[in-house]
Image (tube, rainbow, N blue to C red):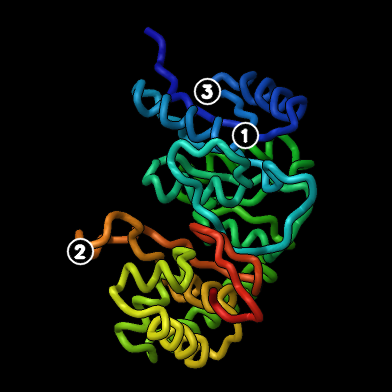
Amino acid sequence: MGVSVVRIRVLVVDDHRIFAESLAAALAAEPDVDVCAAGSGPAALRSLERGAAEGRRFDVMLVDADLGTTAVPPARAVRVPEPGEDGPVDGISLVAGVRSGQLTVRSVVLAEKDDPRRAALALQAGAAGWVAKDCSLQRLLAVIRGVLRDETHLPPALLTGVLRELTAARKHRTDSERLVESLTPREREVLRCMVAGLGRKAVAERLFLSPHTVRTHMQNVLGKLGVHSTLAAVALARRAGVGPVDLGPVGLGPVDPGPVVPGPVEPGSVGLARDVVERGGQPA
């Protein structure tokens, strides 16, 4: 009577088809590994959802750090993809989306080169590992099996840099939280509207205030946060863990905005729920 083998289900997510298919074929040669490949973030989310619905959940997701991009993007705020989204989704945002969906899959990011800043951002988004694409197959298999034991895997050369980035991110978050705490309850409401991408008129309608009063609140928010534009205020708010106001029908009461994925944010590079129009650095 044979011994049953516990199989590991792996999803490879990479928009370079030759790489994805070659890696999938190499992994599939292992006796305890089942593997599928997806060529985009939305396709990966659909595969994960389908696997869960069929009772065949994936255990590990290997995702290209540069998924959906033509060049290595700078470190920036993580944008959590919306359910059913069909547009481009980068690798680290995909990791955040999987975590926010409370899926049990462990994520490992595959990268062309070592980058402490982006590796730290990936860990903050929920990744369990960062692995170079030119590593050996045996090394990758060791990482796959390791993350299933709740281990976190980083190349030794990245460890010091990643720890430095995580420490700096925590300091920025603490400073941002302190500034947000200085706002009045009404100003925090306005800030959440700004995070949601609402302009002055939309905020006024939502909070039943005059546009002039909203403008005053927005100016007070910028002043207390020590920034000069709406985008900078939103970046600081997201570092502090401030989520967007619920954009459902007005009058239904407050609704939990859901999880927010904080991380290092470059000024002027913020994922917004809607466009924010600015004129002369002031909110429109």
Location of residue 167 by image quarter = bottom right
Q: Position of residue 16 (x, y in %)?
A: 75, 32
Amino acid type of the residue that numbered disc 2 sits on in the rendered structure: Gly
* SS label for mark 1: loop
State the quadrant of the C terminus: bottom right
Amino acid type of the residue that numbered disc 1 sits on in the rendered structure: Ser
* SS label for mark 3: loop
State the quadrant of the N terminus: top left
Circle nearer the viewer, 2 or 3 = 2
Amino acid type of the residue that numbered disc 3 sits on in the rendered structure: Asp
Q: Which residue is mark 1?
A: 40
**Of 30 and 35, the residue lying toward us:** 35
Is residue 204 visible to the viewer in this orientation of the structure? yes
**Of 228 and 280, the residue lying toward us:** 280
Q: Which residue is mark 2?
A: 253
Neighbours of disc 3 within 10 Å: few (<14), some (14-19), many (20+): few
Mark 1 or mark 2, earlier in chain: 1
Q: Position of residue 14 (x, y in %)?
A: 67, 35
Q: Which residue is mark 3?
A: 32
Residue at the spot 54% in from the left edge and 82% down from the top edge: 171
* SS label for mark 2: loop
Relative to residue 83, is residue 120 drawn left or right? right
